[in-house]
């Protein structure tokens, strides 16, 4: 069979659902199939996902993809995985069955565990080894919470009968018939348990959280072979799993940000803003974190990264909870209709603030409303808060890396919103590049898999067509608006 007849499947397991992407031998996206999963929120505000549902949905979307396109199953060369990062779960090593729901990255239920660890005086040591600030956002405290609160978890862990980690390692474990317990460098670097300088699980940090390194996954290059799967007998023969990346790292790779100083922002439920800083790490002093971008072919790249809990989720809140819009598409028109003189700011600290503030106890607020503030002005404030938050992080990275940013490459559903993209360009005072393809987090690992399998080379990144937004707002007005945002956000910060 020639390379021209080959296909590659990308799985993109995100916060809201699971996608399957079909790429042909030239890297063209042929078809996409999506399936949502439940967002489980209890009376305490704990946010969870059902891992069984996610795994079944993964099988479903791939099967639907193949059935709808009617391709020959024998022509599938491999499969890649991108995953929602930091979402944490534990499962039985012998059966592969989860012992509880997964704790979603947004969920701050482990804040008390972080407070306990911080009281030991080791927060700065953890940051210096892992690159990330002590926070319930990361899996370290989430795993500790599972071990302390899920019945039987500690006993299974002590007997080495428990696996725990991120969604990628769970999917790999199940897809390979419980044979492969692996994760990649990008996901490992986000656990707050991995020493990103020595490139190994850090025994001292693991011990602080009561976690045994023996129960953690083997860490592999992002373009390695993670095992083989026949999708529980759906395929006539097993295919290799190549190309595994956390979704934000996948988007960075898919955007072609392969050189130091190149930056992307992913607009999803939350947002991840990343700057490639090359093969040498930089310790942030401005509230962002240092992570591994990936390891490809044995060569590690580092990034500066800032994460936001609520960006696209703000639009969902307007629709589902406030019920002031019926569709996200309405926000563009309403924001354009809103009074330009209105000075309302929304601080979306619904589960605290992420980078660069790291205040898990901050509360959300509308600030600066007047009697003339109406529906359109509230929607405008909601859209603008997304751009302001991202600008906070871009500015922090510029300070840390001392690199001037001329361009911000963006991806994700909200990038369709013209008002938001123009406002983003205006407030950051930089060019914003929006690719036609939406599925960058899924395409990145698929591109990596295709390169590893010899389907294509790095010229694949030239396939992306982009729409460009350039600053139109007066620079003094942009600076005044941003200063107002800074003043507003400091009104909700608790420390």
Image: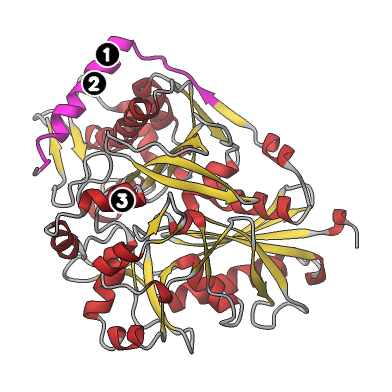
* Residue at the image point whose x is 58% and y is 75% from the top: 180
Between the residue at mark 2 and the residue at mark 3, the CA separation in whole angstroms equals 26 Å
Which scheme is used to colour this image of the protein?
Answer: secondary structure
Q: Are marks 2 and 1 in contact (CB under 8 Å)?
A: yes
User: Which element is circle 1 on?
Assistant: helix
Mark closest to the chain's N terminus, 3 or 1: 3
Q: In screen coordinates, is 206 left or right of 124?
A: right
Q: Quadrant of residue 49?
A: bottom left
Instruction: Name the disc covering residue 477, or none.
Output: 1
Circle 2 packing at 10 Å, graded few (<14), some (14-19), many (20+), is some
Looking at the image, which is closer to me, 116 or 45? 116
Q: Is residue 192 above or below residue 133?
A: below
Between marks 2 and 3 in the image, the one whose residue lies nearer the viewer: 2
* Residue at the image point whose x is 41% and y is 14% from the top: 472
The residue carrying mark 3 is 319
Looking at the image, which is closer to me, 336 or 143? 143
């Amino acid at each position: 069979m020639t390379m021209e007849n080959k296909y590659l499947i990308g799985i993109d397991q995100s916060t809201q659902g699971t996608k399957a992407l079909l790429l042909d031998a030239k890297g063209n996206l042929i078809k996409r199939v999506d399936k949502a999963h439940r967002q489980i929120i209890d009376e305490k505000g704990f946010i969870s996902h059902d891992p069984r549902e996610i795994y079944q949905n993964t099988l479903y979307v791939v099967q639907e993809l193949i059935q709808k396109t009617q391709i020959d199953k024998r022509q599938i060369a491999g499969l890649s995985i991108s995953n929602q990062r930091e979402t944490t779960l534990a499962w039985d090593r012998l059966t592969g069955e989860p012992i509880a729901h997964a704790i979603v990255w947004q969920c701050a239920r482990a804040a008390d565990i972080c407070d306990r660890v911080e009281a030991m005086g080791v927060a700065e040591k953890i940051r210096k080894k892992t690159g990330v600030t002590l926070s319930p956002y990361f899996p370290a405290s989430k795993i500790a919470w599972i071990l302390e609160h899920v019945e039987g978890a500690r006993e299974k862990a002590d007997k080495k009968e428990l696996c725990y980690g991120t969604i990628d390692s769970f999917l790999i474990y199940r897809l390979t018939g419980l044979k492969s317990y692996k994760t990649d460098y990008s996901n490992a670097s986000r656990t707050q348990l991995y020493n990103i300088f020595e490139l190994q699980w850090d025994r001292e940090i693991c011990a602080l959280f009561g976690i045994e390194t023996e129960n953690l996954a083997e860490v592999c290059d992002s373009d390695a072979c993670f095992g083989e799967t026949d999708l529980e007998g759906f395929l006539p023969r097993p295919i290799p799993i190549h190309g595994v990346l956390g979704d934000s790292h996948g988007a960075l790779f898919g955007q072609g940000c392969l050189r130091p100083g190149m930056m992307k922002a992913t607009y999803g439920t939350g947002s991840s803003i990343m700057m490639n800083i090359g093969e040498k790490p930089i310790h942030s002093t401005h509230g962002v974190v240092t992570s591994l971008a990936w390891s490809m072919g044995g060569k590690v790249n580092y990034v500066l990264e800032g994460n936001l809990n609520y960006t696209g989720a703000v639009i969902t809140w307007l629709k589902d909870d406030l019920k002031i819009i019926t569709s996200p598409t309405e926000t563009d028109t309403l924001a354009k209709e809103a009074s330009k003189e209105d000075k309302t700011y929304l601080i979306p600290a619904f589960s605290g603030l992420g980078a660069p503030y790291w205040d898990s106890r901050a509360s959300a607020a509308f600030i600066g409303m007047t009697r003339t503030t109406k529906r359109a002005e509230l929607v405008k404030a909601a859209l603008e808060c997304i751009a302001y938050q991202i600008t906070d992080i871009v500015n922090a990275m510029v300070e840390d890396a001392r690199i001037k940013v001329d361009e911000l490459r963006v991806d994700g559903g909200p990038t369709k919103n013209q008002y938001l993209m123009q406002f983003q360009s205006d407030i950051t005072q930089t060019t914003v590049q929006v690719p036609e393809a939406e599925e960058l987090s899924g395409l990145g690992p698929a591109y990596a898999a295709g390169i590893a399998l010899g389907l294509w080379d790095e010229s694949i990144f030239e396939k992306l067509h982009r729409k460009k937004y350039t600053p139109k707002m007066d620079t003094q007005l942009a600076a005044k608006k941003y200063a107002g945002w800074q003043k507003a956000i400091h009104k909700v910060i608790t420390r």
